[in-house]
Amino acid sequence: MRQQGEGGSSNVFSMFEQSQIQEYKEAFTIIDQNRDGIISKDDLRDVLATMGQLNVKNDELEAMVKEASGPINFTVFLTMFGEKLKGADPEDVIVSAFKVLDPEGTGTIKKEFLQELLTTQCDRFTAEEMTNLWAAFPPDVAGNVDYKNICYVITHGEDKEE
């Protein structure tokens, strides 16, 4: 895992599409109320006030600013978003969620069961999304899906075998 801080953000721009970077730049500019290139507590207080949040406590603002390792310039701002987005959940958290569905501890789940869950619960998968899932993670001949591989790809971005 990359270290957070000065050296860790060198490749942050490659994590986003150009259009996303432009949107984050616009958001940064809105938040940076005094236009000094750094988001401060005062900037946060002012932008929250424009959104109707008038009684934000100083320690709440302090906590927001302290989420960064130093002054929040645009690169740090983008890095913070990148870390929040890419680190959706650590691999062990996702594996633990799947283990609830695998009481025998086999490391696999039946394709039919997983498909039923993903197409009927919460943020439901479409038929196309299911087709893409099975193309990326084909079940074995017995119809079992290796959820540990799915978890690895979610958190690392590539197949273990590669």
Image: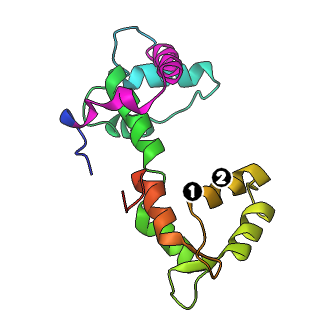
Q: Which residues are magenta?
A: 8-32
Q: Is residue 152 left or right of residue 11?
A: right
Residue projecting furthest to the top: 35
Which residue: 38% across, 36% down?
Answer: 80
Which residue: 25% across, 29% down?
Answer: 10
Which SS does the magenta portion mostly show? helix
Residue projecting furthest to the bottom: 104
Residue projecting furthest to the front: 141
Callout 2 environment at 10 Å: few (<14), some (14 to 19), or many (20+)? few
Quadrant, the C terminus? bottom left
Closer-to-camera residue (124/127) = 127
Residue 54 at x, y = what percent? Answer: 58, 27
Query: In the rendered image, which quarter is residue 37 located in?
Result: top left
Can you identify the residue that label 2 sits on? 132
Task: Report helix, strand or loop for mark 2.
Answer: helix
Can you identify the residue that label 1 sits on? 136
**Quick check: is 25 in the magenta stretch?**
yes
